[in-house]
Amino acid sequence: MEIKELQSKFIEKFGENDKEIKRFFSPSRINIIGEHIDYNGGKVFPCALEIGTYAIARKNDDNVLNLYSLNMENNGKIDIDDLVYKKENDWMNYAAGMAKYIKESGFNIGGLDVLVYGNIPNGSGLSSSASLEMLIGEIFNIFYNEKKIDRTKLSLLGQDTENKFFGLNTGIMDQFIIANGKKDHALLLDTNTLEFEHYPFDLKDNKIVILNTNKRRELKDSKYNERRAQCDEAVSILKNYKDIKYLCELGEEDLHLLENIPDEIVRNRAKHAILENARVKEAAQALQDGNIEQLGKLLIESNDSLRELYEVSGEHLDSITKHSNEFEYCLGARMTGAGFGGCGIAIVKEDKIEEFKKYVFEKYKEDTGLEAEFISSNVGESVHEIK
Ligand code: GLA
């Protein structure tokens, strides 16, 4: 949908007045590598996409957030003096949560009329929720705070919304990349220190293809928190052998310490975290060296580990990544994001992409009965006002 069309829908919905209307965009994201380690103090390597969430917004004097989404059914009002989670508020809880934590950290909030439209496939694991959080955050930042909330703070407020408002103990990766991404660059983030560096995302004659399994991520939330608790359990045991706060402070040379973890499942989770972190560093180097074959290999290793050791893939992601990796001109494919359904990514030779899609579509349908969807998107900018 064109931004002009969104603007007319905004006027249709909220009417005209003399207050200034502004337009915003917030991207979705993929993670190239470094999965399930952003809550283990590890390094992650995501990038922002050109698909995402748009908003048209304007201040109001009524102390309410008037929210209208072109994608969702439940629309309505949030009273900014009553910022508590309410089930019936559905997606609007993201706006309520952001407003609450912006206010609690000493920044300003106030009334807003907001129309939202997203072109991220729903439940696809490309971070539509973090995209929405950063969008609302940036709208408050620009209308009420003269942009004084810096990008790291903005992403931490988004994480508060997930963790405290929704009770989902996610890490910082999604919000951070959406707040700090850069066009045509991947971002290497140290989730322990929040230091980051942009890497030119040049895949030579290859491209990223996003593989949507069209399998929604059921059970994701409880399984996610369970994984996180298992990592905490591993740390509490390993602390007796080495002074650590996070699993990813351990390197490959420390793998022998895992023998002290009696539960095999917990041991496997820890092994994944340590080795995945090592792969991220190698992947960033491979991209910098233009060694895309090596990058592809690391993606495959990461996927194997997420399937076998961390157990967050499931039959749909396993099928789509397996058939992608069988294809001769695919350099590497893996699941991306939280897992349990959602999307994968594949690095494919540009002139073989159509053939690739046809091959994977057929094989995946044979396995699962579902039709895969292939999404192409360039690497885009962080959340911003559209001028
Ligand atoms: C979700 C979470 C992130 C991260 C990924 C897995 O996207 O929001 O914080 O943990 O899963 O890497």
Image (cartoon, helix red, strand yellow):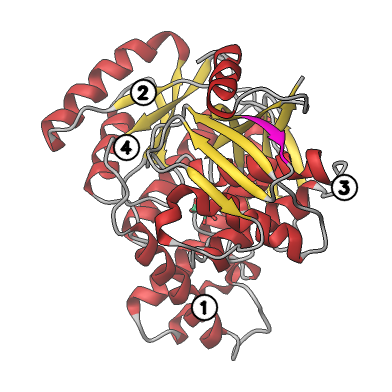
Q: Residue at x 40, y 76 (%)?
A: 266
Estimate the spatial distance between the alpha carbons at disc 2 and disc 3, rounded to whole Å.
39 Å
Mark 2 vs 4, N-terminal side: 4
Q: Where is mark 3, residue-wise?
A: 148
Estimate the spatial distance between the alpha carbons at disc 2 and disc 4, rounded to whole Å.
13 Å
Q: Residue at x 46, y 20 (%)?
A: 376
At label 2, the amino acid type is Phe
Say which quarter of the image contains residue 144. top right
Q: Nearer the viewer, residue 258 or 310?
A: 310
Q: Secondary structure at mark 2?
A: strand
Assess whether mark 1 and mark 3 are in contact (beta carbons under 8 angstroms).
Answer: no
Estimate the spatial distance between the alpha carbons at disc 2 and disc 1, rounded to whole Å.
36 Å
Badge 4 density bin: few <14, some 14–19, many ≥20, Cα 10 Å:
many
Q: Where is mark 2, residue-wise?
A: 374
Q: Where is mark 4, residue-wise?
A: 321
Residue 329 visible in image: yes
Mark 4 vs 3, N-terminal side: 3
Estimate the spatial distance between the alpha carbons at disc 3 and disc 1, rounded to whole Å.
35 Å
Q: Percent from the top left, x then y, of residue 265?
A: 34, 74
Q: Nearer the viewer, residue 316 or 91?
A: 91
Q: Where is mark 1, residue-wise?
A: 232
Q: Percent from the top left, x then y, of residue 110?
A: 74, 49
Highlighted range, magenta: 56-60
Assess whether mark 3 and mark 2 are in contact (beta carbons under 8 angstroms).
Answer: no
Q: Secondary structure at mark 4?
A: helix
Q: Nearer the viewer, mark 4 or mark 1?
A: 1
Assess whether mark 1 and mark 4 are in contact (beta carbons under 8 angstroms).
Answer: no
Q: Is residue 322 above or below residue 6?
A: below
At label 4, the amino acid type is Thr
Badge 3 density bin: few <14, some 14–19, many ≥20, Cα 10 Å:
few
Q: Secondary structure at mark 3?
A: loop
Assess whether mark 1 and mark 2 are in contact (beta carbons under 8 angstroms).
Answer: no
